[in-house]
């Protein structure tokens, strides 16, 4: 039964940039995938695994999530994240939080310790304080690279996410981001929206998306990809069809998914999407269209 | 071609309450439907019609949206709203705004005057001020009934929404709410989430949902209902099947939908859902399971 254990993470989809460090992105993704897989190997749940993997990515300044997040027009980091448990359809989400390093953990606390799915802004931050999460200065999240990106109007590509299946065949998905460089304060993208950036259902698949958030929202991309798997499509074919649906919404994106049977799959219409996985056949990583 | 003009609004789904005023709710819904239909009759767009209808419902203290909104644990009104244009899949959304009477209009401004879909909290309010929306004190939104509901832990049922189809066969949907009584500050329900509380696509249907927001989010109810229409189901059958899908998410809800061909349809698993419509056959309204 444990042969189906699998985890797949992404480090964001977007256009190639001159300053892309493909090796750093692949290495960071692989470390996150291994952290998640280690949870699964010890008998941990898919939910625990995607949270653990996403925390590694949030802590890595290479990615646009947690430390290293893209900055608002005003030069601040405002973070969004969500998590969903395919076994129960339970979900948790936060948006526009600026004083925690790991919003994915705050999202999970919303799921497990409130009657709600989503908290935003000051209310979400007050809840995090009540729960004893360590409060940090916004500056801790801000890297020199993020400041330069804002000054140069460079788009950020590094939203992160993870999907996993555990020994019981339960799937889970998590997504975390700093959003788009130069966004209006208060802007919420697809990452914290259930059905858009994140979806998980044991009867279909767990999905995490990345790319132009506004387009992903318009086609509720994560739910759409899960439905295609639920309808019987192979994981890769479902991922490709879902990404093609984005064309109607005038945007490019990528997604990763895992099925309850342990298949990992991905697709992207952008030039690159950093990704790494560990499954029954071993581990691997990729960046561009090179596949592996 | 104009024979297909149709608009359908809801005033919220929930359990019967001893203090239900069914007549006031039906009358309020009918006034809103007429306001929207008047826009359509003059050649206005479905988008204009659902905004106009939703504003009437927000202004009516009978409903849990705009004036009369349910209050947070702290006794404040924090409003959520979203709107979607089925012709273009463009969407706009706001959550956790507390100083405007008509959040649906703010949501439309987000759609039309930013590169974003969703703004929340202080950022959304700053944007609204920039756009010249009239700023009001939070107290203006707070009714005596809402204060009593909070004191007595009564659940609020009055989320509002509208769906319409115009002479060109374009559909649009809008949803607006004060959320649930006693919610944590910062809580966001399904109403402002595209695919959950609101969805519109000319290739399927326009949908607005109401009920237990957390459950609606878990099954992305609005998108699910639209997909069922897109798959060929009759509007009422699609509405019923979608509402049944809620059972997996441990919640009750209702929804309204309109198809590009001008069919209006609804379903609810709650005891009642106030609703009213104007279509090619005339107008009508309902409250409980009495049908019309």
Image (cartoon, coloured by chain):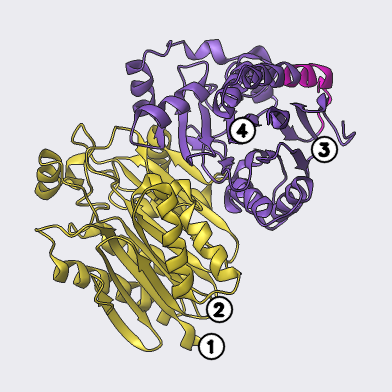
Chain colours: A yellow, B purple
Q: Please state, as top left, top right, bottom left or bottom right, where the C terminus of chain B lies in the image.
A: top right
**Quarter of the figure that contains the N terminus of chain B:** top right
Q: Is residue A160 above or below residue B277?
A: below
Chain designation of label 1? A
The location of residue B107, given as percent across then percent down, is 46, 28
Q: CA distance from mark 4 to mark 3?
A: 17 Å
B82 is higher (above) or lower (below) than A59 = above
Q: The numbered mark 3 sits on a residue in which chain?
A: B
Q: Which residue is mark 1?
A: A1
**B239, A2: nearer the viewer:** B239
Query: Which secondary structure lies at badge 3?
Result: loop
Which of the two residues, B28 or B5, is positioned nearer the viewer here? B5
* CA gap, disc 3 and disc 2: 38 Å
Q: Earlier in the sequence, mark 1 or mark 2?
A: 1
Query: Which residue is rendered at x = 42% and y = 54% of the image?
Result: A246
From the image, state whether disc 3 or disc 1 is nearer to you. 3
Q: Which residue is mark 2?
A: A168
Circle nearer the N terminus (4, 3): 4
Do the numbered discs 1 and 2 sit on residues whose CB atoms are within 8 Å? yes
Give the labeled residue for mark 3.
B271
Judge from the rendering whether residue A174 lies leftward or rightward of residue B46; answer left or right. left
Q: Which span of residues is magenta-colored? A: B16-29
Q: Quadrant of residue B20?
A: top right
């Amino acid at each position: 039964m444990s042969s189906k254990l699998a985890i797949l993470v992404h480090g964001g989809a977007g256009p190639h940039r001159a300053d892309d460090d493909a090796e750093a992105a692949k290495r960071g993704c692989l470390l996150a995938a291994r952290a998640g897989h280690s949870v699964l190997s010890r008998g941990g749940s898919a939910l625990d695994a995607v949270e653990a993997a996403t925390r590694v990515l949030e802590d890595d300044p290479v990615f646009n999530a947690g430390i290293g997040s893209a900055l608002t027009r005003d030069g601040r980091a405002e973070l969004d994240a969500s998590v969903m448990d395919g076994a129960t359809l339970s979900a948790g989400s936060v948006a526009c939080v600026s004083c925690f390093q790991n919003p994915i953990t705050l999202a999970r606390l919303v799921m497990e310790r409130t009657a709600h799915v989503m908290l935003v802004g000051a209310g979400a931050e007050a809840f995090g304080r009540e729960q004893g999460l360590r409060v940090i200065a916004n500056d801790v999240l801000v890297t020199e690279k993020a400041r330069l990106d804002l000054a140069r109007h460079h788009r950020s590509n590094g939203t992160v996410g993870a999907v996993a299946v555990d020994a019981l065949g339960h799937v889970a998905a998590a997504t975390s981001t700093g959003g788009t460089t130069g966004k209006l304060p208060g802007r919420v993208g697809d990452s914290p929206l259930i059905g858009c950036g994140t979806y998980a259902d044991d009867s279909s698949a767990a999905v995490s998306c990345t790319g132009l958030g506004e387009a992903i929202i318009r086609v509720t991309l994560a739910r759409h990809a899960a439905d295609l798997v639920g309808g019987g499509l192979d994981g890769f074919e479902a991922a490709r069809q879902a990404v093609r649906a984005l064309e109607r919404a005038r945007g490019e994106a990528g997604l990763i998914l895992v099925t309850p049977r342990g298949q990992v799959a991905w697709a992207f219409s952008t030039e690159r999407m950093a990704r790494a996985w560990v499954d029954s056949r071993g581990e691997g990583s990729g960046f561009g269209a090179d596949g592996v």
